[in-house]
Image (cartoon, rainbow, N blue to C red):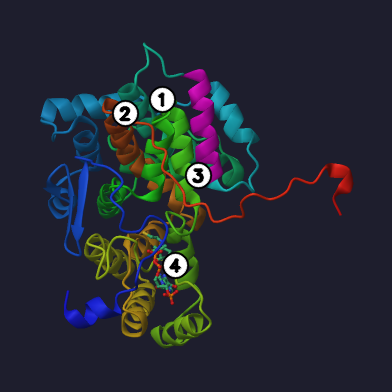
Amino acid sequence: MGEAQKQQAPKKTGGLAGIVAGETNISAAGGAHTLEYRGYSIYDLAEACIFEEVAYLLLYGTLPNQTELDDFTARIRKGRDLPEAMKTLLEMVPVGAHPMDVMRSATSFLGTIEQENENHDELAITERLLGIYPSVLAYWYNFHHKGLRSDTDTGTKTIAGHFLTMLHGRKPSELHQKAMNVSLILYAEHEFNASTFTARTIVSTMSDIYSGVCGAIGALRGPLHGGANEAAMELIQEYTSPEEATAGVKHKLATKQLVMGFGHRVYTEADPRNRVIKEWSRKLCTEGGKPELFTVSEAIETLMWDEKKLFPNLDFYSASVYHMMGIPTELFTPIFVMSRITGWAAHIFEQRKNNKLIRPNADYTGPNGLKFIPLEERA
Ligand code: COA
């Protein structure tokens, strides 16, 4: 980064910004052009892998060979099944509920019917969650929006294929499956982000894995974290041309509004994941006959850099990628859960291996030594 940019980069204070809160060997966010999972560049992984290979890498620490991958995908596939009690729960959750609340509730409920114990360990639970999440989301959505009780047996091999097939009731194109795989790979892991740190904090009390994941889902739901991909879609859809977008976003900045999908706590110049997802957005918008979605997005990107030196994070172009696959906007953040469960679980395992209760201190800023007033004498 040049000196001029350094001076313009927003100064980060509060919120533990810049504080190293522990060690990890799962991923390294190395700057604007690198992010590595267990030492492997996300660019290589996104180019060559299906999501399951990356999930295995994060959970087991090494890339799988063909047999290990086949066994792993078979176990995940087995985990797609929804118990009757889970179907009942999903049918009872109201249509107006936010799908992130559905994911959180389903996780919590699974923790009561398939508890963590000596027969059901953290790896088995994670593989189950990897299998069941796409089914949970598609079943709940299709039941409430299409009146369907969708079959979880889609006959598809991958998580990406299973989710798209179950949601739409038809097999997705190769291009869409590849785009979904790339997106799941890019979302899988990101060091001590808010939801991962929440999960680590929860299990540091020696709590169970489901509690850690429920807390992580709660943290991810907010628009400053995972919720930004939904907010980004709403923003892009406000405009029909690049000119309109430029004027509209200029107005938002002038009125001090946050522009969702821009900026990052750790990066100051660029989000290394952006260049991959941006190309997929370009590809899908062009191929799907909605090039204006991409040109509007690019106009927002240009303006944000020119005016604020802010850059798109992974959430910004993910929004148009999902939209072009026919995915309803309210399901964008739950897809993040389908992927990030791998990073959360890897961090939960790592935390447990060398556990120390996470309990920082605070600087007290309130009054001291006040004279106590009995209830009957208080004004
Ligand atoms: N739109 C407009 N202004 C933004 C902005 C955005 N997306 N992101 C940061 N800024 C501005 C802040 O308002 C602040 O301006 P100020 O100094 O005039 O008050 C300045 O840039 C510094 O940002 P700050 O909020 O201190 O950075 P942070 O590290 O605390 O926040 C985010 C990081 C991600 C929370 C923040 O960039 C943001 O809210 N982005 C939008 C939500 C989003 O996309 N989240 C997904 C993250 S992957």
At label 2, the amino acid type is Asn
Q: Is residue 29 left or right of residue 215?
A: left
Residue 197 percent coordinates (x, y):
37, 43
Name the residue carrying label 3: 218
CB atoms of marks 1 and 4 within 8 Å: no
Q: Quadrant of residue 122?
A: top left
- Give the magenta part as a residue range: 100-114
Q: Is residue 289 above or below residue 209?
A: below
Q: Quadrant of the C terminus?
A: bottom right
Name the residue carrying label 4: 260
Distance in Å between CA atoms under marks 1 and 2: 8 Å
Name the residue carrying label 2: 355
Q: Quadrant of residue 225?
A: bottom left
Q: Considering the numbered disc 1 on the image, is that residue within a helix, a strand or a loop?
A: loop
CB atoms of marks 1 and 2 within 8 Å: yes
Would residue 113 be counted in the magenta stretch?
A: yes
CB atoms of marks 1 and 3 within 8 Å: no
Res 223 seen here? yes
Res 156 seen here? no
At label 4, the amino acid type is Met
Distance in Å between CA atoms under marks 1 and 4: 35 Å
At label 3, the amino acid type is Gly
Q: Residues within 10 Å of mark 4 (few under 14, many from 20)?
A: many
Q: Is residue 56 left or right of residue 194?
A: left
Query: Which residue: 36% across, 83% down?
Result: 303
